[in-house]
Image (spheres, helix red, strand yellow):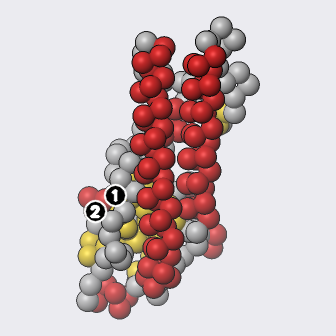
């Protein structure tokens, strides 16, 4: 819980670890990509399918957004470290208690506000048609098509263009280069 009456997600309290972690379905492996709404994979008409050119055109804005998010994440981690020093242990959740000293209450409020801003900004990224895969490294995918099947164009913060893709059910380790015949078959 973030505070008394805190928001919940699917009936569960929002914990800091959950909020800061990359989005994945419970029980799935580290490299399994999962769209925010997995049912979209069954209804491909609702996916925002991008060409390589369209996805690359978004990169300056996406890159700037991811840079800000990586800085925000580091700031939240520093805030949590400072809070841990004040309360004696690293918190898994942040709950504002009436008995908290004023300085601790203020720190908790700042962490809560920072986490909400962090999450809202990732939603902006997804509004562009991007899918966040790893919030720690800035790994982002874009839906596209090769030979009529839906794939992910794969981009990682720091890369100047999208140069790889992978199947929907493969992760970062399944990346393949976008070269030669693959580029010619993209988005058909």
Q: Is residue 12 left or right of residue 92?
A: right
Q: Name the residue under label 2.
A: 174
Which percent across, then down, holds residue 170?
Answer: 34, 59
Q: In this view, does 176 lie to the left or right of 7?
A: left
Asked whether residue 121 is in view, the answer is yes
Q: Disc 2, disc 1: CB below 8 Å?
A: yes
Q: In this view, does 157 lie above or below 112?
A: below
Which percent across, then down, holds residue 150?
Answer: 46, 73
Q: In this view, does 173 lie above or below 47?
A: above
Q: Residues within 10 Å of mark 1 (few under 14, many from 20)?
A: many
Which percent across, then down, holds residue 79?
Answer: 48, 32
Along the line of sight, which residue is nearer the eye, 54 or 106? Answer: 106
> Residue drawn 46% across and 74% down?
60
Q: In this view, does 65 lie above or below 92?
A: below
Q: Name the residue under label 1.
A: 171
Please, which residue is most extreme toward the top here? 99
Q: What element carries label 2?
A: helix
As drawn, the label of residue 114 is none
């Amino acid at each position: 819980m973030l505070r008394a009456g805190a928001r919940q997600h699917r009936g569960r309290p929002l914990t800091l670890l959950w909020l800061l972690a990359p989005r994945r379905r419970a029980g799935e492996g580290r490299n399994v990509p999962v769209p925010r709404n997995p049912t979209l994979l069954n209804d491909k008409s609702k996916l925002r399918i991008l060409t390589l050119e369209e996805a690359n055109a978004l990169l300056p804005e996406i890159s700037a957004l991811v840079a800000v998010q990586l800085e925000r994440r580091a700031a939240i981690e520093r805030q949590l470290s400072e809070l841990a020093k004040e309360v004696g242990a690293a918190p898994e959740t942040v709950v504002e208690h009436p008995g908290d000293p004023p300085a601790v209450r203020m720190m908790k409020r700042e962490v809560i506000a920072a986490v909400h801003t962090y999450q809202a900004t990732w939603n902006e990224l997804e509004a562009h048609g991007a899918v966040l895969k790893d919030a720690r490294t800035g790994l982002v995918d874009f839906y596209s098509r090769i030979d009529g099947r839906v794939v992910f164009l794969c981009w990682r913060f720091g890369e100047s263009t999208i140069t790889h893709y992978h199947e929907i059910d493969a992760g970062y380790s399944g990346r393949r280069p976008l070269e030669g015949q693959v580029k010619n078959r993209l988005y058909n």
